[in-house]
Image: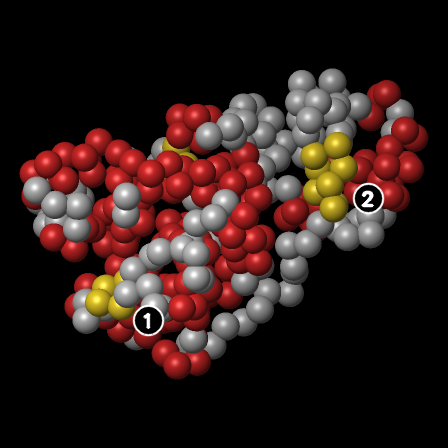
């Protein structure tokens, strides 16, 4: 059975992400309901913290917001997730992250920034869609890279992702990324229908931004902003050190709502000895 755009109005009137309810999608739905239920439920709960931001970004970028569940499959919605050469919510490699404007150095790794990495992922997916003309191929290309998808299209003589088979051209993980993402999106839309209960995280991901152009110890920032250090670190997972980065004049530190003015008023009071650059 193929659901066309009219059948899946919940995807939005101006975006096209046709979903084929085939055996591969159903397999992962059942897996997420059974042996994978505990992990799936935990990941979906973790995602509740970031999903409003991520969906807003995808909507502004004019791509299907349901594609955000690719991040669930890639990282379990964990900004600190590391897998060999990739990391962050969207599991960017260093090269691809830098290509899409993410700063990665001794002080900072913006692949772990929920906001900036999602902006980069949205642009990458949009570029892949423009190249392949299909969101399923865009998802597969995100996982495998563009070249393997081009080769698969040539070998199989089709742009229908569901015609691609496992072999030497595409890895199993790439063939699974699309049905897994679709299954996750379907369950997330109606979790109760699938027997999934979501636990909302205690900490929200709401914040204000303060531009800080110098390296300043986060402990001092927490003190003068009257915020908890752990909360400050949680809002800024991209920081590799207990400090804001030097040589990054446009860096914006995220602080809890209502603390921007407090920090800005007290920031000049931080002595030069407290500034690390």
Q: Viewed as shown, does residue 91 lie left or right of 232?
A: left
Q: Quadrant of the C terminus?
A: top right
**Residue at the location (50% across, 45% down)?**
61
Q: Quadrant of the N terminus?
A: bottom left
Above/below status of 218 relative to 2: above
**Residue at the location (33% across, 64% down)?**
5
- Total marks drawn? 2
Pointer 1: residues within 10 angstroms few (<14), some, or many (20+)? Answer: few
Q: Which mark is residue 114?
A: none
Q: Which residue is mark 2?
A: 260
Picture quarter containing residue 25? bottom left
SS assignment at label 2: helix
Residue 40 image offset from top left, x and y in percent: 39, 65
Residue 142 visible in the current orientation: no
- Judged by depth in the image, the label closer to the viewer, 2 or 1, is 1
Residues under labels 2 and 1: Cα distance?
45 Å
**Viewer-side residue, 214 vs 174:** 174
Q: Which residue is mark 1?
A: 7
**Residue at the location (87% across, 43% down)?**
261
């Amino acid at each position: 059975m193929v659901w066309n755009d009219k059948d899946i109005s919940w995807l939005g009137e101006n975006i096209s992400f046709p979903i084929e309810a085939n055996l591969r999608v159903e397999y992962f739905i059942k897996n997420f309901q059974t042996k994978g239920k505990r992990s799936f439920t935990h990941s979906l709960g973790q995602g509740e913290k970031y999903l409003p931001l991520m969906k807003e970004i995808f909507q502004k970028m004019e791509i299907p917001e349901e594609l955000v569940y690719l991040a669930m499959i890639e990282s379990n919605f964990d900004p600190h997730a590391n897998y060999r050469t990739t990391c962050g919510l969207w599991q960017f490699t260093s090269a691809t992250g830098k290509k899409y404007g993410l700063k990665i150095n001794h002080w900072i790794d913006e692949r772990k920034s929920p906001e900036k990495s999602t902006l980069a992922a949205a642009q990458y997916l949009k570029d892949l869609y423009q190249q392949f003309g299909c969101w399923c191929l865009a998802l597969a290309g995100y996982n495998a890279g563009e070249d393997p998808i081009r080769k698969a299209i040539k070998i199989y003589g089709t742009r229908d992702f569901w015609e691609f088979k496992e072999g030497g051209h595409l890895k199993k993980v790439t063939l699974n990324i699309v049905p897994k993402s679709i299954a996750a999106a379907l369950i997330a839309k109606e979790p109760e229908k699938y027997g999934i209960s979501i636990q909302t995280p205690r900490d929200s991901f709401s914040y204000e931004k303060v531009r800080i152009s110098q390296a300043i110890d986060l402990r001092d920032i927490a003190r003068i902003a009257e915020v908890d250090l752990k909360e400050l670190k949680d809002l800024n997972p991209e920081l590799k050190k207990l400090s804001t980065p030097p040589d990054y004049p446009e860096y914006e530190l995220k602080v809890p709502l209502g603390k921007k003015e407090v920090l800005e008023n007290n920031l000049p009071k931080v002595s030069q000895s407290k500034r690390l650059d």
